[in-house]
Amino acid sequence: MANMFFPDDNLFDSHCHLNDHSFDGDRAEVVGRATAAGVGKIVDIAIDIECSRKAIAHAKEHTGVVFASVGIDPDVIIPSSELFQGNLDKPEAFWDEQMNEVRESILANREQVVAIGETGMDKFWIVRNPDSKPTSEEVEKVMQRQEMLFRKHLELAVETKLPLTIHSRACEEDCLRIVLDYPQARGVFHSYTGSYEIAKKVLDAGWSLGVNGIITFKSAQELRAMYKKILGAISSDAQPADFYAKGVYFETDAPYLSPEGKRGERNEPAAVAKIWEKLLIL
Ligand SMILES: [Zn+2]
């Protein structure tokens, strides 16, 4: 498998929220530091229509370095999320309209948009808010709506031939089951922290995994062991392309998930260099 995002095989940040407001004061410097660290390209990931617009604007501002991924995060259908705003009761036509905007933004900006997402499904909200105690009907409704929105992204990916960046938190198996319905689609299960068994199935189906700062956390021995098993022996002169060929992509998920030593601080795409170093000595 060749790099599904770019024609070259250099090191790049496949998942970063450069459009996040925390970068508003120094975005150009952040991009400059990434380039200086050898991270030549950054995929700016949207979580809604507004972020999609911003990501495209950043791509136009930093031609050839910043690229956009457009779409709607499952966060919009998570009851405890800021983005939720009564979205559970909105009709499917509302989401069709939103997806039409996403489609238009792709067609009008083919040079800038290299991916769709982030999209996917998330069940972590149930665990994260133990006090909310949703009924099983509520959980089922939320998951059905998330699946509906996810499928619309998959259809758009097939139509536009773009890769997807998938958020699958606590939902890896469901996401895999759904993507298998779209044999022409491809993409990355970003920030993958699920089991080895599901990871293997994801890779066998031709999909990829996104690895980020979590792999550097002291507590992440199991995750490191899993990637070691997936990647096999890594030679000391391995290149990023060797990882892409095995279906493993580097990402920061900045401004989140700063690597060990910087946890809690704002993360930035230059940190891909740290993740790359860590994977070389797994
Ligand atoms: Zn993200």
Image: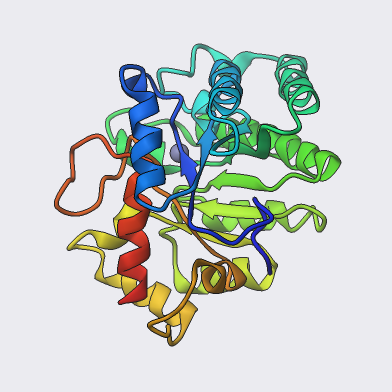
- The quadrant in which the C terminus is found is bottom left
Q: Residue at x 59, y 41 (%)?
A: 120
Q: Nearer the viewer, residue 229 or 114?
A: 114
Quick check: can you spot residue 223? no
- Ligand 1 lies in quarter: top left
Q: In this rendering, would 9 be left or right of 270?
A: right
Measured from the top left, where is residue 201 in percent x and y? 61, 71
Q: How many marks?
A: 0
Q: Quadrant of residue 48?
A: top right
Measured from the top left, where is residue 38 in percent x and y? 40, 53
Q: In this rendering, would 15 be left or right of 5?
A: left
Q: In this rendering, would 5 be left or right of 271?
A: right
Q: Residue at x 42, y 85 (%)?
A: 235
Q: Quadrant of residue 1?
A: bottom right
Tell me: residue 172, above or below residue 157: below
Q: Nearer the viewer, residue 169 or 110?
A: 110
Measured from the top left, where is residue 215 in percent x and y? 31, 61
Q: Residue at x 60, y 24 (%)?
A: 60
Q: Residue furthest right?
A: 159
